[in-house]
């Protein structure tokens, strides 16, 4: 199982690197200055001029195609990274199963209901009834005063 997970991780890593390289190439093309001068296509700059007409200094169709591909790459990259995180968590759990059990036990203890504090009119403090401090690891907590 561990070997299979490692193989899947390495294949996901190859996909991730190829997507990052492609995204880098697209970003550099979008942010490169056009040959005739002027403003680059950009990743999020407007493709129309101030009058609302398509810009004449860039290939608008190419810019839209590149931006679309970049959005697809970003989405795919997020999905791959989620898969990588899941596989790494699975590997970590397989490497140390006792830790997973201890973490789930601790989580259950943390989510367990705690006693509610009440206002004690005599002392003028908020107190937890019948609490001796054992929850916090304090022995003889009921006899301590501050």
Image (cartoon, grey):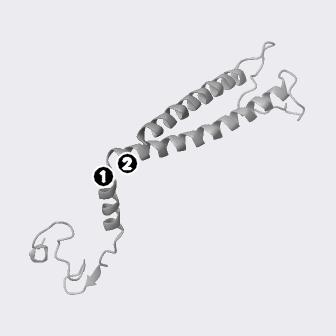
Q: Nearer the viewer, residue 132 or 1?
A: 1
The secondary structure type at the circle numbered 1 is helix
Q: Height in image: 15 above or below 89?
A: above
**Which corner quadrant holds the N terminus?**
top left
Q: Could you tell me how many numbered marks the image carries?
A: 2
State yes or no: discs 1 and 2 in contact (Cβ < 8 Å). yes
Mark 2 closeness class: few <14, some 14–19, many ≥20 residues within 10 Å: some
Circle 1 sits on which residue?
Answer: 99
User: Percent position (x, y) of residue 34?
Assistant: 77, 16
Q: Residue furthest bottom?
A: 122
Is 82 on the left-hand or right-hand side of 108?
A: right
User: Percent position (x, y) of residue 146?
Assistant: 13, 70
Q: Tell me where residue 52 sits by quadrant.
A: top right
Circle 2 sits on which residue?
Answer: 93
Is 119 on the left-hand or right-hand side of 18?
A: left
Q: Which residue is depicted at the point 59% across and 28% down? A: 20
User: Percent position (x, y) of residue 89?
Assistant: 42, 46
Q: Label 1, label 2: how many angstroms apart (C-alpha)? A: 8 Å
Q: Nearer the viewer, residue 55 or 108?
A: 108
Q: Tell me where residue 71 sits by quadrant.
A: top right
Is 146 on the left-hand or right-hand side of 101?
A: left
Q: Tell me where residue 25 sits by quadrant.
A: top right
Q: Which residue is depicted at the point 59% across and 31% down? A: 15
Q: Residue furthest top?
A: 35
User: Percent position (x, y) of residue 22?
Assistant: 65, 25
Q: Which residue is depicted at the point 81% across and 26% down? A: 62
């Amino acid at each position: 199982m561990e070997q299979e997970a490692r193989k899947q991780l390495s294949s996901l890593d190859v996909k991730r690197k190829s997507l990052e390289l492609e995204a880098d190439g697209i970003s550099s093309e979008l942010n490169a200055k056009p040959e005739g001068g002027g403003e680059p296509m950009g990743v999020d700059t407007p493709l129309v001029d101030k009058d609302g007409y398509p810009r004449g200094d860039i290939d608008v169709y190419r810019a839209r195609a590149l931006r679309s591909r970049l959005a697809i790459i970003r989405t795919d990259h997020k999905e791959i990274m989620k898969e990588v995180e899941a596989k790494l968590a699975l590997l970590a759990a397989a490497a140390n199963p006792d830790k997973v059990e201890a973490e789930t036990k601790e989580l259950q203890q943390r989510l367990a209901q705690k006693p509610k504090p009440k206002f004690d009119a005599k002392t003028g403090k908020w107190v937890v009834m019948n609490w001796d401090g054992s929850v916090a690891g304090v022995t003889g907590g009921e006899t301590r005063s501050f």
